[in-house]
Amino acid sequence: MIARHHLAILVLVLGMVFAIPQANAERLIVSVSNHRVTVTPNYSGEELVLFGSVEKDASTPAARGNYDLVVTVSGPRADMVTRRKERKFGIWVNTDYRQFLQVPSYLALFANRPFADIASPEVERRQQLGLDNVLLTQRVGPDYADVVPNDVFRRAFVRLRSQRGLYREDTSAVTFLTPTLFRTGIPLPAEVPIGTYDVEIKLFSAGSLVTRTETAFEIVKVGFEQFVANTARQNGLVYGLVTAAMALMTGWMASIVFRKD
C-alpha cells in the first residue's frame, strides 16, 4: 500500500515537471520608430522602421546559427465586400459578390528571404506565412470558410487591396545587420486606415519556429476632420443641429449673393 502511494506521488511529480512549459532559448527584443502616427489633411504616407535583436541564453543550442524572420503587420479589422461585374446589354452590372468577414484593413508580410526557403509548406500554412496562407474568412452562402488561394473572389480581393498599397508582401524587406540584429520598414500609404496596428514577429531556424513576440502602433487622425468625426460619433444631436444651422446659413448667404435687385 505504501509502495503504491509513493509510486502515485512520483507519477504526479513527474507529470507536473513535464507540464511546466520550457522557456525559449532565444528572446526577441523589438521596437517601432513611432508608436503613434498622426494623420492630417495633407498626410501623404510615411514609412515606420521596426528594429530589434535576438537575445540568446545559456540554453541556446551551440549549433544554431542562421535565423529567419517573418514580420506580419495587420491593421484594424472590418467586413468588406468584393463584387464581380459583367457586361450585359452594353453596360457593366454587378452579378455576384463575396463578403469577407473581419479581415485586416491593412496587411503586410515581410521576411528576409522567400517563405518557401524559410519553412515547409505545412509550416507555411500553419504559421500563415505569405498572403496565400493568411486566413481571410468569407461568407459563402450560409457558411463561413477560408477558401483556396486561387479562388477568384479571394484573388481579386487581395489584388485590389494590393493595388492601393494596403496589402503587400516582400520577402527581402527584413535585413539582418548582424547575425542577431535586424530591421525592416513598414510602408504606410496615404489612405491608411485609422486604428491600432498589431505587429507579430516570428523567428525561425532550420525550418522551425523558435520564438515570437508582438508589438503595436496606432494611427490617429488629428485636426478639424477628426473634431467633426468625434462630434458626430459622441454628440449626434449637437452635430445634427450644427449641420442643419450651417445648411440654413449657406442657403441664406447664397440667396443674398445671387439676389436680383
Image (spheres, rainbow, N blue to C red):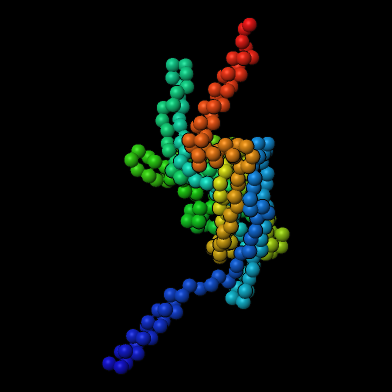
Q: Is residue 173 above or below residue 153?
A: below
Asked whether residue 94 appears in the rendered view, the answer is yes
Residue 102: image location, x then y, percent = 46, 45
Q: Quadrant of residue 163?
A: top right
Q: Residue at x 56, y 53 (%)?
A: 198
Tell which residue pokes out farthest to the left in this image. 1
Residue 228 located left or right of residue 88:
right
Tell which residue pokes out farthest to the front in this image. 261
Asked whether residue 132 appears in the rendered view, the answer is no
Residue 234 located left or right of residue 45:
left
Q: Residue at x 41, y 30 (%)?
A: 96
Image quadrant in which the C terminus is located: top right
Residue 69 located left or right of residue 93:
right
Image quadrant in which the N terminus is located: bottom left
Q: Residue at x 52, y 27 (%)?
A: 244
Q: Residue at x 51, y 31 (%)?
A: 241
Tell which residue pokes out farthest to the right in this image. 177
| Closer-to-camera residue (114/219) | 219
Residue 7: image location, x then y, percent = 34, 88
Tell which residue pokes out farthest to the bottom in this image. 2
Residue 70: image location, x then y, percent = 59, 55
Residue 211: image location, x then y, percent = 56, 64
Q: Quadrant of residue 67?
A: bottom right
